[in-house]
Each structure stands twice: as structure tokens, then as C-alpha cells.
Image (tube, grey):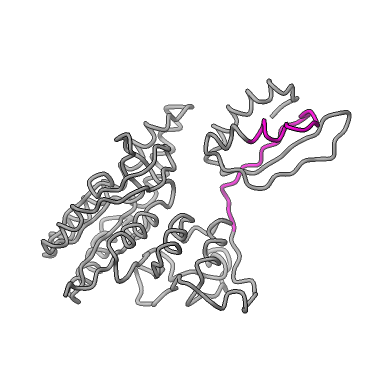
Amino acid sequence: MAAPLVVMKFGGTSVGDAERMRTVADYIARTVRRGNRVVVAVSAMGKETDDLLHLAAQVSGTHPGREMDMLIPAGERKAMALLCMALHDIGVPSASFTGSQAGIITDTEHTKAKIVDIRADRIQAALDEGRVAVVGGAQGVSTDREVTFLGRGGTDTTAVALAARLGADRCEILTDVEGVFTADPRVVPDARLLPVIGYEEMLELAQQGAQVMQTRAVELGWVNGVVIAVRSTFSNHPGTLIREDPLVEQRNKVRGLATDRHVAKVTLVGVPDRPGVAHAVFAPLADASINVDMIVQNVGHAGTTDRSFTSPSVDLARADRLLEAIRRELGAAEV
């Protein structure tokens, strides 16, 4: 009978410097010595992804999707190699894998690709050889053989997808907080930790801005029945279990608050107030995979109206370019 399989994800703060990287290696070593097989998905160190995005903004105003996907996963590749070096130093055999080497196949959407298949032969071979498999998070290879990035927080999705594909006994999301709280404990000091939360509730919180889990990771866990433990790298607290909760409707209570500080509000001023305009505005945004959240239309005046919506601030530059063309076509006043 095979030893239990544990899939772990370590976030950027967990591997933020050399000392923390060694702490993570010790954590993995203890898990291995308890008789487990281990697969690790690792994020870029600290704020390295932010640094790469800032650097891209300094050299380019266009940010071609293919080149962004070549750039951003460089942080995860650096982290996975360093973590393997730390593991080898303490006598734990390991091997690092990029998303493509791990067999993570995605669609062709750059900067926010979705996983369509996992061909985990090399991961399984590493486990069979007694190695820890360390996978660079948030990345894969598209069906047309291009490097792809799964979006911010995509290492969560990598971990849950691998757990589902490999039939893991446990999936742990290890971060710098002790679990899922009723609010961000860095903002609300008396926020309470939730020992258990249902997939549906966690999905709602993630969609509204809670950064402890990526939305698609929660969806993958829900669809595949993967119980996800969210806990701290730096304490022994059991954390929060994300799982099916049959009592969610009976409880019928607010479980938590989420905030999102990375939102842009966009207004088209003086849009013609006639049928079909909403489709003309929002269909091109949808085709460009730009997420539109809250939409507000003012009361019309003199045959025109103002139409506002919110969108992730990371998509603002692309949205602005599209909307300028739409503005001219519709004869609106300004964006």
C-alpha cells in the first residue's frame, strides 16, 4: 500500500527570504519523515511578482500577453530551484518542475489561463523514486505549446489541481495567516478564525476579494471533492478546513467580510441611451477576458446616459484601450 500523499502550497511570504526558505524545507522534511509522499507547489519569493509587474510597466505600456507569461513565472521557477537546493542540503531527495514539465496543460488565454488537463507522469515518477516533487506554481503550457500564467494566486490552483489529479490524501495551503478569518486580521484585529468553512461560502469570499484563496482553486476543490486545509507555515495551529458543509443553508448567517483594494471604476460619459448599447460596450470586454463586476447606469438625459462599472485594476489599461475605440464608435463624450 502506497504511503499517504500530501500536496502542499507555500505562498510568497512563506518563502520570502533564505531563512524562510530553509524553514519551509524543514517543514517538508518533517512531513516526509512521518511517512508521507509530498508534492509542493511554490509561489515566487515575497513581492517578486509585484517587482516583475512593476518592471514590465517601466519598459512597456502594452504588456503583450505572451511576453508577460514568459516573464511572470520566472519568480516561481527561481523559488522552486532554491527550495530543492534547501531540501537537498538537509538530506531530502527532491526534483523541481516547471508547469510544463509537471504536465499542466492549459487553454490559450494569456495572463489568466485555465487548466484543461494534467499529465502527471513525471511527478508520479519522482514520487515513485522517493523524491519530493517541487512544482513552480501558477504556470503551465498551452495547447499550442506556449508558456502560460494562471493569474495572481494561481499557485493555489496548481496545488488543488495536482491534489485532485494525483488523488492526494491531504491538500494544505500554507500561508502567513493561521487560516480563514471572519475578516482580514491585518485590518480587523478581533477577527475570528473559522475552523471549517463550506466551499460555497469560501468561493463567495474569494470572489469578493478575500486573498487567502484563489477563486478557481476553491471551484476545483468543490468539483473534485478535495478537502483543503488553510494554515500557517509558521505555527502548529490546525487552521481552517474548506469542505462540503451541509449546514450552510440551515445556518443562514453572514460568515465573513472581504475587501478588495485592487478595483478600478470606469465611466463612459454621454453614451447614447438606446437598446443595444450595453452589448456594444461589454461584449468586447468579455471577448478580451476582462472581468466586469458592478454595473450602474444613470438616469438618461437629453438622449444620453453615463454608464459605470468596476473591474480589476490590473485590467484597467487594456479596458481603457478597448473603450476608447468603443467611445468613438458610439459617439460618447469621454471615458
Rendering coords of residue 183 (x, y %):
57, 67
Task: Based on the picture, tell me whether residue 266 belongs to the magenta stretch.
Answer: yes
Please state which of residues 131 and 105 is positioned toward the viewer in this rendering.
Answer: 105
At 71% from the left and 39% from the top, the residue drawn is 308
Q: Work out whether 314 lies above or below 244.
A: above
Q: Is residue 263 left or right of residue 198?
A: right
Q: Work out whether 306 lies above or below 222.
A: above
Rendering coords of residue 161 (x, y %):
35, 57
At 20% from the left and 77% from the top, the residue drawn is 34
Task: Based on the picture, tell me whether residue 127 belongs to the magenta stretch.
Answer: no
**Magenta residues (range):** 259-282
Please state which of residues 136 and 283 is positioned toward the viewer in this rendering.
Answer: 283
Classify the position of the C terminus by image quarter: top right
Rendering coords of residue 151 (x, y %):
43, 46
Rendering coords of residue 238 (x, y %):
39, 77
- The image quarter in which residue 15 lies: bottom left
Q: Is residue 267 left or right of residue 220?
A: right
Callout count? 0
Classify the position of the N terminus by image quarter: bottom left
Q: Is residue 273 left or right of residue 67?
A: right
